Amino acid sequence: DNYFSVMVTVSGKGTYSFKTAEINGYHFVAEGEYTATGLQELRFVGKGTPQTAQAENVTLKFGNATCGQKIMVYEENYPNPDSTVVLVTGEPFMGDYNYTYAYNGHGKQLWRIDASSAPAISGDIAYMITDNEVYARDITTGTPIWNTSMGLSLHHGPVPIDGDNLYVAGGAKLMSISRLTGAVNWSYTFGTVHYSMSAPSVANGKVFAAYSNNLYCLDLDGNLIWKYPMTNSIRSNPAVADGILYVGNDGGSLYAINVSDTSTVWKHAIDMTGEESPTVDDGKVYVQGETKVFCLDALTG
């Protein structure tokens, strides 16, 4: 299943056979017959078993001509991630339903722990959550620094960091946790029923989270600033940039809301299921719909 292609100009019909030199336990072979002349694809198929996960340069020789192809060999048994991939100094961190993984730049697994979220990285520490715990781990070794049991089921979204504090949500609560010790600073209770929730976001000294069909804005001490009702349940993680909050709901629309007065800046219909979370960068909002990816002007929609 592993191959690379080279485009060649065929001047005469006939059979061909090319083979690269063996490197790291494998090589590539291209064999077949050209029945037509002109620009054609020459496909090299991988043979053998790679021995080490690393980056390599494979050289092709055609008479006196040579060209190179960079090959990446990845570790076997990659996870099936269902969370955002986080890159730190070229090394990927990711989560699937059962674990959080750390890899080096060539796909070699550095460590794996029983968690189920993409980590938040600050300095040389990774912070992540599982069903009811928040973990802090050394990013290089995975060595435990602290664990905190929250006593309730946590929403499996990204863990935002603001200064010395982390923020997590679950079980109808929003909680602030010390990044240094894992101690709980405060918790804010939204209600008594465990409705749908989103992972919180932090921006400009405020914390934003969704519970059922309401958006909440709190200060960093856990005091409610405002509550904004929507017509449908919110499971999208809010994103904030330049004083505007972007969030989707089960009604299939993406909203831009002014943080200062909760007025609706714009609304855009998108074929979204409600769980998709927007990303804001350089004046644009990116969001995944059910069958399309959208890029919208952040100010006008």
Image (cartoon, rainbow, N blue to C red):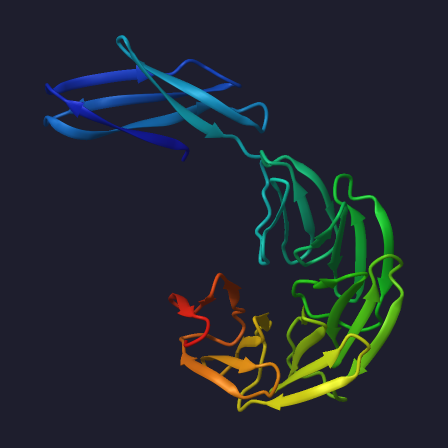
- The residue that appears at 30% across and 16% down in the rendered structure is 18
Q: 165 or 184: nearer the eye?
A: 165
| Quadrant placement of the C terminus | bottom left
Q: Quadrant of residue 46?
A: top left
Q: How many numbered circles are shown?
A: 0
Residue 197 appears at what percent x and percent y? 65, 78
| Quadrant placement of the N terminus | top left
Residue 19 appears at what percent x and percent y? 35, 16
- The residue that appears at 43% across and 20% down in the rendered structure is 58
- The residue that appears at 57% across and 51% down in the rendered structure is 80
Q: 218 or 193: nearer the eye?
A: 218
92 is higher (above) or lower (below) than 18: below
Q: Quadrant of residue 147?
A: bottom right
Q: Is residue 290 visible?
A: no
206 is higher (above) or lower (below) than 288: below
Q: Is residue 76 visible?
A: yes
- The residue that appears at 45% across and 80% down in the rendered structure is 253
Q: Is residue 144 left or right of residue 25?
A: right
195 is higher (above) or lower (below) than 46: below
Residue 32 appears at what percent x and percent y? 23, 23
Residue 169 appears at what percent x and percent y? 73, 73
